[in-house]
Amino acid sequence: MNEQADELINGKGNSAAEQNPTTMKERALSAFPAFRSRNFRRYFIGQIVSMIGTWLQMVAQGWLVLEMTGSAFQVGVTAAASSLPTLFLSLIGGVIVDRYNRKTILLWTQGASMLLAFVLGIFTLTGAVTVPIIIALAFLLGCVAAVATPAIQAFLSEMVERDQLHSAVALNAAIFNASRVIGPAIAGLMIAWIGTGGAFMANGLSYVAVIVALLGIHTVAPRKNADAHQPPLRSIRDGIIYTWEHPLIRTIVLFVSVVSIFGWSFMSMLPVVAKQTFGMSSDGMGYLFSAFGLGSLSGTFLVSMSSGKIRSSAMVIGGILTFSLALTAFTFASDAHLALGFLFIAGIGMLSAFATMTATVQRLVEDRYRGRVMSIYLMVLMGFMPLGNLQVGFLSEQFGTAIAIRIGSIVVLLATALLFSYRKEIQSAWHEYREDRGE
């Protein structure tokens, strides 16, 4: 993220016209160079429509399970089913992405996701849906995502020029955060108007946009990967060894695993909080999701604007502290408007920390290990979320949702304090590592 901000601000690799923009269009293109690529413009439009649809389904799915069972634990189980495959399949997904045409992989995965959304919609609209059916379809969708997610990250480098790649990565992250703001709000209204079944069907239709966009994208075939014929298990093993032996990357991955389990898990409980704590309907639940999403989107701009001005370690620790304290305050809030404010602040803190950690890993990793290390990082970030969803659902059943979320916040707070206390030892290990490698 620091390198990206430097390039965007200082105009590295850009033409003279881009460095001295005279029109509004030139100013926009100078700030977001990836939009100079017709391929990326098509992808951006299709993907943001599709991601909004994905959030429609995620929110509607949690609401449907809660209405059917009244159980916070079942809501957590369903959320876990959709993200559990990432834990087991993301490394294999990375191998698939390195060996086959990425555009073809994306067309197949988006088509499969569309089919699964339509199937869930039909089951719901006909009244034949059951919790096991929802869980099974959520699991299958997670399996597809385990391949699609690394494919999207890799395909970005094929859609744009090399000097536009940092911009493309940032805008791709913006798609996720913007859709997280828009999608839940639309979901709340849509559930009230046409029901959860209609929301699932709308998600299915949203995939048409990204499929059409992909069909309109024309790229040069990527160069052959020198390790393409290496045994998959050996390639995965080498990536794991490199990640573990690198002191800073190892620290980030371990810290992310704790936050993934005990921090992100509160999201799966927002339908429960909306209905049982604040007596909200589905549209009110959408506002809760959107408040956190809007804070996350704001955190993206905060990281960009502070790049080079605030140390990465301070951004990570400060961001997580902000998240933990705001989320703890959220669990004590009795007023819905106050709760929305705390979620907004929590979103700023969480995204600021995670954007900085992701950028740090990207900056530190050697190019030949980049794909494998990022797949391990994403596996920990997304694959451990099912464990968090299960634990917060169980604790909610036993002690109440507010206490369950509060416990997670405290664990994250303690992990942050531990990270801060060992910062000098981590830095010393990093210097020794560089000396051993002759850097």
Image: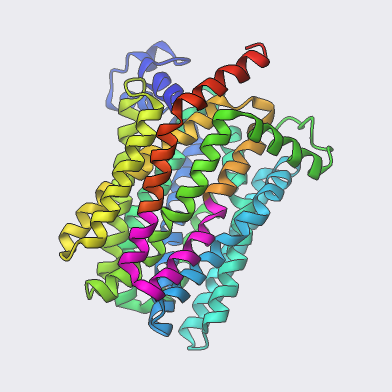
Work out whether residue 94 or residue 50 is closer to the camera in this orientation and state it: 94
Q: Is residue 54 above or below residue 245?
A: below
Q: Is residue 124 above or below residue 11?
A: below
Residue 156 horizontal side relative to residue 283, left or right: right
Which of the 4 quarters of the picture holds residue 371?
top right
- Residue 277 shows in the view: yes
User: Farthest bottom residue?
Assistant: 127
Residue 385 horizontal side relative to residue 353, left or right: right
Which of the 4 quarters of the picture holds residue 322?
top left
Residue 416 horizontal side relative to residue 166, left or right: left
Main SS, magenta residues: helix
On-image quarter of the C terminus: top right
The colour mode here is: rainbow
Q: Is residue 140 above or below residue 343?
A: below
The picture places residue 2, in percent across and down from the top left corner, at: 42, 24
Q: Is residue 338 above or below residue 26?
A: below
How many marks overall? 0
Q: Residue at x 44, y 78 (%)?
A: 65
**Magenta region:** 382-409
Residue 383 magenta: yes
- Residue 214 shows in the view: no
On-image quarter of the N terminus: top left
Residue 324 magenta: no
The picture places residue 217, in percent across and down from the top left corner, at: 58, 42
Work out whether residue 232 or residue 28 is closer to the camera in this orientation and state it: 232
The picture places residue 160, in percent across and down from the top left corner, at: 54, 31
Q: Residue at x 23, y 53 (%)?
A: 342
The picture places residue 40, in percent across and down from the top left corner, at: 50, 38
